[in-house]
Amino acid sequence: MHDLIWTFLVSMLPIIEIRGAIPLGVSLGLSVELSFILGFLGNMLALSILFAYLEPVSIWLRQNFDFFERFFSWLFERTRSRYGASAETVSELFLFFFVAIPLPGTGAWSAALIVFVFGLPKKHTFISITLGIFMAGVLIASAIAGVSTIF
């Protein structure tokens, strides 16, 4: 039971996400399929929490602490002025590939931060990120299944 919980919880961590949860689950003795399912569900829960709470938490921080008001004002102004034109062209397809390619720093956490900072619409970006998580999981699971059949 602990193996299931660890695999699920690790998939919720930034940077590690589903990319690390699947190999962890397999190394703990879980099947590739079960590791994939737990990794996907945990990563989706983390994404849902980020989408639900990034904005309200930032608003609360801005209202209650001057430092965060200055920080978020600086962050939004700087990022949107520098990359605002690019953000308009950031499409759901970009976010899908950004998350689907299993490289460090290109997971759901980073994508959720991109959506938050640029104020992109949540509905379509959530779907794109979800599909990206699924594809990253398929790629990692396929690689692990292929390696395990070799040995």
Image (cartoon, grey):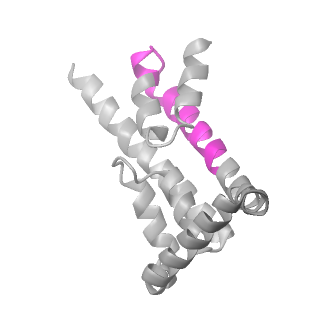
Examine the image and state in which quarter residue 26 appears. top left
Q: Decide if residue 24 is in sight here.
A: yes
Frontmost residue, 104 versus 38? 104
Name above or below for residue 98 compared with residue 40. below
Frontmost residue, 27 versus 80? 80
Badge count = 0
Q: Residue at x 57, y 55 (%)?
A: 130
Considering every residue shown, the one lying at the far bottom of the view is: 85
Whether residue 105 appears in magenta in the rendering, the answer is: no
Q: Position of residue 111 (x, y in %)?
A: 51, 59
Frontmost residue, 45 versus 36? 45
Name above or below for residue 119 compared with residue 6. below
Examine the image and state in which quarter residue 42 appears. top right
Region of the chain picked out in magenta, as a range:
25-47
Looking at the magenta stretch, what is its main secondary structure?
helix
Q: Position of residue 98 (x, y in %)?
A: 41, 61
Q: Residue at x 62, y 67 (%)?
A: 70
Q: Position of residue 72 (x, y in %)?
A: 61, 66
